[in-house]
Amino acid sequence: MIDHVQLKVKSFEKSRQFYARALEPLGYGVQYEDAASKSAGFGAKGATELWIGEGGPVAPVHIAFRAGDRSAVQKFHAAALTAGGKDNGAPGIRTDYSPTYYAAFVLDPDGNNVELVCNESA
């Protein structure tokens, strides 16, 4: 249903580095970058699904990415923390969502709640 999402960020370079490192274990990388407008698009090769751009009002949002398996959730969480994110929920089952909802949550440099979820049994 959704083609792409754009987040407004306070610091383009800080957020670019965060998302490049946090999304790398998922096979996502920078697919487009415009230093003049301080914007970048991330996704799988040839696709731009997450955009960041510096400027404008920054209002924290929640965005969830789908993972192929639980290992990807764990790798994302570790990479996001190493990239400067703040833990907002370690990898684990979230039974309040469903018995198989395995997710991790990290706050990015602007306070956005970034989630990675695998909704399959182990």
Image: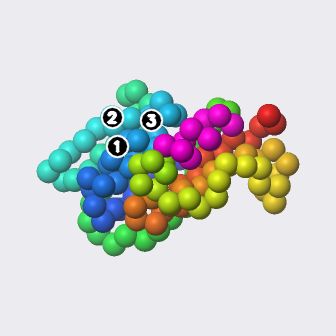
The quadrant of the rendering that contains the C terminus is top right
Upstream in the sequence, badge 2 or badge 1?
2
Upstream in the sequence, badge 1 or badge 3?
3
The residue wearing badge 3 is 24
Residue 27 to residue 109: above or below: above
The residue wearing badge 2 is 31
Judge depth for marks 1 and 3 and give the one in front.
Answer: 3
Label 1 vs label 3: CA separation? 13 Å
Are the residues tagged 3 and 2 within 8 Å (C-beta)?
A: no
Are the residues tagged 2 and 1 within 8 Å (C-beta)?
A: yes
Residue at position x 77%, y 54% in the image: 94
- Secondary structure beneath disc 1? strand
For the residue marked with disc 3, what is the amino acid?
Glu
For the residue marked with disc 1, what is the amino acid?
Gly
Crowd band around label 1 with a 10 angstrom C-alpha radius: few (<14), some (14–19), many (20+)? many
Which residue is outermost to the left? 36
Residue at position x 46%, y 56% in the image: 85
Q: Position of residue 41 (x, y in %)?
A: 34, 43
- Secondary structure beneath disc 2? strand
Q: Position of residue 11 (x, y in %)?
A: 28, 61
The quadrant of the rendering that contains the N terminus is top right
Main SS, magenta region, reads helix
Label 2 vs label 1: CA separation? 6 Å
Residue at position x 41%, y 41% in the image: 21
The residue wearing badge 1 is 41
Residue range (magenta): 70-79
User: In the rendered structure, does residue 75 fall within the stretch colored magenta?
Assistant: yes
Q: Position of residue 82 (x, y in %)?
A: 45, 48
